[in-house]
Amino acid sequence: MSALIAGVLLPSEAGRPLEAVTFQADDLSFLRQTVGGDVQTVDLLRPAAALYVREDADRLGAPVNRRATLLRRAANPGRRGEYICGDAILVGPSEENGRITSVPADYSDVLLAENSRFRVEFQPPEGGRHLPLPWPIWPEVFLAYAEGLRIGRALPRQAVRVIPA
């Protein structure tokens, strides 16, 4: 029996809320059904995680997933011009044996928080000391990601991390 994995579903439609999901680690049919086809992994570097998206979503004209795109751009400074299309599932980084892990608290605690406020901090891609911004404080997590990326243009090699205020 495989492990139960916790993830976060990021629908491409802005009006649909994020959703906590659980599935068996070896249940690729759940991933395929949720994203609507064959899956592709998009690695997030800082904090480490992975997005599962439909492999050919952009070619098929799937809508841009603004929320998944913000996560990718924030975590991967070298990929700031790229987009994610279609629904996505956020999980943890894969283990060395390729097994999927559950979404890290660095993501789930802010993405699934209710009635919270958020700050931004910057991280060197290779790890090391974080540079927190004491202000401003944002009332919505994806607004914090978007503004963090805007502010982060001055720090193009830094990953953007959103944390509870």
Image (cartoon, rainbow, N blue to C red):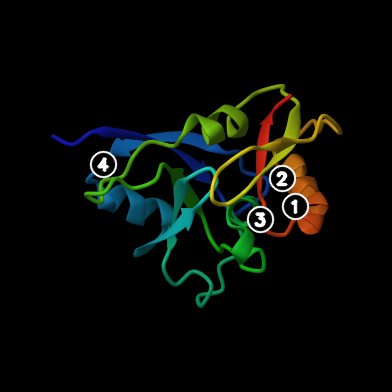
Q: CA distance from mark 4 to mark 2?
A: 29 Å
Residue at mark 3: 66
Q: CA distance from mark 2 to mark 3?
A: 11 Å
Viewer can see residue 64: no
Three-letter code for the amino acid on which mark 4 is drawn: Ala
Residue at mark 2: 145
Three-letter code for the amino acid on which mark 3 is drawn: Arg
Q: Pick the quarter of the image with the N terminus.
A: top left
Q: CA distance from mark 1 to mark 2?
A: 6 Å
Task: Point out residue 16 in the picture as x, y percentages from the top left corner.
Answer: 62, 43
SS assignment at label 4: loop
Task: Point out residue 69 in the picture as x, y percentages from the top left corner.
Answer: 62, 57
Marks 4 and 2: which is nearer the front?
A: 2
Q: Which mark is residue 25?
A: 4
Mark 3 or 4 closer to N-term?
Answer: 4
Q: Which mark is residue 149?
A: 1
Q: Residue at x 58, y 30 (%)?
A: 112
In the displayed image of the protein, which residue is found farthest to the bottom? 59
Indicate whether 80 appears above or below 124: below
In the displayed image of the protein, which residue is found farthest to the front? 128
Marks 1 and 3: which is nearer the front?
A: 1
Mark 4 or 1 closer to N-term?
Answer: 4
Q: Residue at x 29, y 45 (%)?
A: 95
Q: Residues within 10 Å of mark 3 (few under 14, many from 20)?
A: many
Q: Residues within 10 Å of mark 2 (few under 14, many from 20)?
A: many
**Count of numbered tags:** 4
User: Is residue 5 left or right of 79 when viewed as pictured?
Assistant: left
Q: Residue at x 45, y 56 (%)?
A: 43
- Residue 22 sits in which quadrant? top left
User: Is residue 4 left or right of 75 when viewed as pictured?
Assistant: left
SS assignment at label 1: helix
